[in-house]
Amino acid sequence: MPVHQYETLFLLDATKVAADADAVKQQLHHMLEKHGATIQVSREWNYNQKLAYPISKQKKGAFHIVYYTMESTHQAALERDIKLAEGIVLRQMTLNVDPKWQEAILGIAREEHGKEFAVRGMQEEAAVTTDPSAIGMEMGVGMEEGHGHGGPRRGGRRPEPSEKHE
């Protein structure tokens, strides 16, 4: 059976984590180990984050990230058990870590400031991709000259703001 390395980011109920963070962490570990997972790194990501929208009537969530190795055939059963743990886990996202990046990712995850490094990298990447001219150039889209709107060439003319549609 092939053994893969996985990264799972859990969104947990912040009120239950605030009441007893260690018990919640142990429950997550027990759930993973029950399916044969070997936990490599487990740490809080952000324990009091305001959510963009309520999830299961919760306005705040606690993020916890776990790196583990496990046989790939057990992943479906693990995800089913995670869904059944409704009282604690609000959402989860699991990624299969590419073998060429395993050591680098685990090295960052083990560092005390690895979380800040990853967040800073995401913020820098977002700043680059929010520049409209950069997005067009990354996609290989030619910029239309003379209009200054930075969008792709679509043909036809753009209506003037003073023109009325009938």
Image (spheres, rainbow, N blue to C red):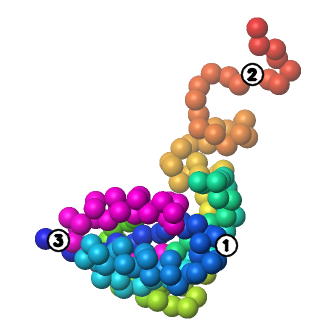
Whether pointer 2 and pointer 1 mark residues with C-beta atoms closer than 8 Å, the reply is no
- Dot 3: what SS? loop
Q: Disc 3 versus disc 1: distance between alpha carbons?
A: 36 Å
User: Who's the residue at 31% across and 78% down the image?
Assistant: 33
Residue that numbered label 3 is attached to? 2
In the rendered structure, which segment of residues is drawn in magenta? 65-93
- Dot 1: what SS? strand
Residue 26: quarter of image = bottom left
Kindly identify the amino acid type of the residue bearing the numbered disc 2.
Pro
Residue 106: quarter of image = bottom left
Query: For this view, does 93 lie left or right of residue 160?
Result: left
Whether pointer 3 and pointer 1 mark residues with C-beta atoms closer than 8 Å, the reply is no
Report if residue 92 lies within the magenta region.
Answer: yes
Residue that numbered label 2 is attached to? 159
Residue that numbered label 1 is attached to? 48
Residue 31 pos. (x, y %): 36, 73
Residue 115 appears in the rendering: no
Residue 32 pos. (x, y %): 34, 74
Sequence-wise, which precedes: disc 2 or disc 3?
3
Residue 163 pos. (x, y %): 82, 17
Query: For this view, does 75 lie left or right of residue 132?
Result: left
